[in-house]
Every structure is written in C-alpha cells, then in structure tokens.
Amino acid sequence: MKVAFCTSTGLEVDQNFSQTNSYTIWDIGPHDSSYVHTIFPPEGIFACDDKIAARAEAIRECAIIYSREINGPSVAKLVARKIHPIKLRLILRWRN
C-alpha cells in the first residue's frame, strides 16, 4: 500500500496538507517498507480554482496520507478519492 507523508524535510511529518511543499511516498507492506518517490504540488497550484482537488490528484496513488493538520473540505475530497487522511498531533520522524 502506498502512503503519503506531508513533509518539508523528507524525514518527518511536519506540514499541513494544504500547505506542504512536498509529499514523500512510501510503499508499506506487512514485513517491509521502501521509499518510492517525492511528489511536489503541481506548478501553478495557487492559480488553480480547486487547490484541494489538485493536491489530491497529485497523490492519487496513495491509500493514506499523514499530515500535521487537515481541514474538513480537504478530508472530504480525499476520502471521496479513497485516500484516508490521518492527522498527527506530534511530529513523526522516520529513518531510511
């Protein structure tokens, strides 16, 4: 299963869904995990009519997204695409 993490460093979940400058994608299985790639929000996203939909489309391959904060409209648009958001209260760090 592919999982997205809202991150500014690639090493921790420290960003909000709608403000992150990158999504780090990992493939997580029952016995191991591996880094897949990093996705950056689409060019011109701030000129987009629907910024949330553009961000959701960028991570369409993922089943779960971890972020520090996420608002209700973002949650609704992600869940409609079968992407399940998880909001973390603390910064989550990981090691490669």
Image: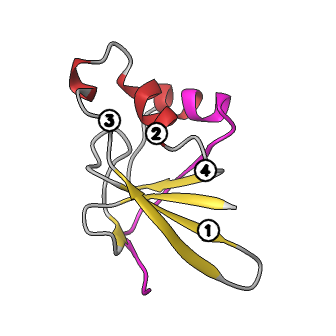
Which residue is the site of mark 4? 62
Sooner in the amino-acid sequence: mark 4 or mark 1: 1
> What amino acid type should be assigned to the residue bearing mark 2?
Ala
Which residue is the site of mark 3? 42
Mark 1 → mark 3, Cα distance in angstroms: 22 Å
Mark 4 → mark 2, Cα distance in angstroms: 9 Å
Mark 4 → mark 3, Cα distance in angstroms: 16 Å
Mark 4 → mark 1, Cα distance in angstroms: 9 Å
* Label 4 residue SS: loop
Q: Which residue is drawn at 47% across and 31% down?
A: 74
Q: Quadrant of residue 82?
A: top right
Q: How crowded is mark 4: few (under 14 residues within 10 Å), some or many (20 or more)?
A: many
Q: Which residue is drawn at 62% across and 59% down?
A: 2
* Label 3 residue SS: loop
Mark 2 → mark 1, Cα distance in angstroms: 16 Å
* Label 2 residue SS: helix
User: Which quarter of the figure is the C terminus placed in?
Assistant: bottom left
Which residue is the site of mark 1? 27
Which residue is the site of mark 2? 58
Callout 2–callout 1 Cβ contact below 8 Å: no
Q: How crowded is mark 3: few (under 14 residues within 10 Å), some or many (20 or more)?
A: some
Q: Where is residue 61 in the image (x, y as percent from the top left)?
A: 61, 47
> What amino acid type should be assigned to the residue bearing mark 1?
Asp
> What amino acid type should be assigned to the residue bearing mark 4?
Cys
Left or right of 87, for residue 61: right
Q: Nearer the viewer, residue 26 or 12?
A: 26
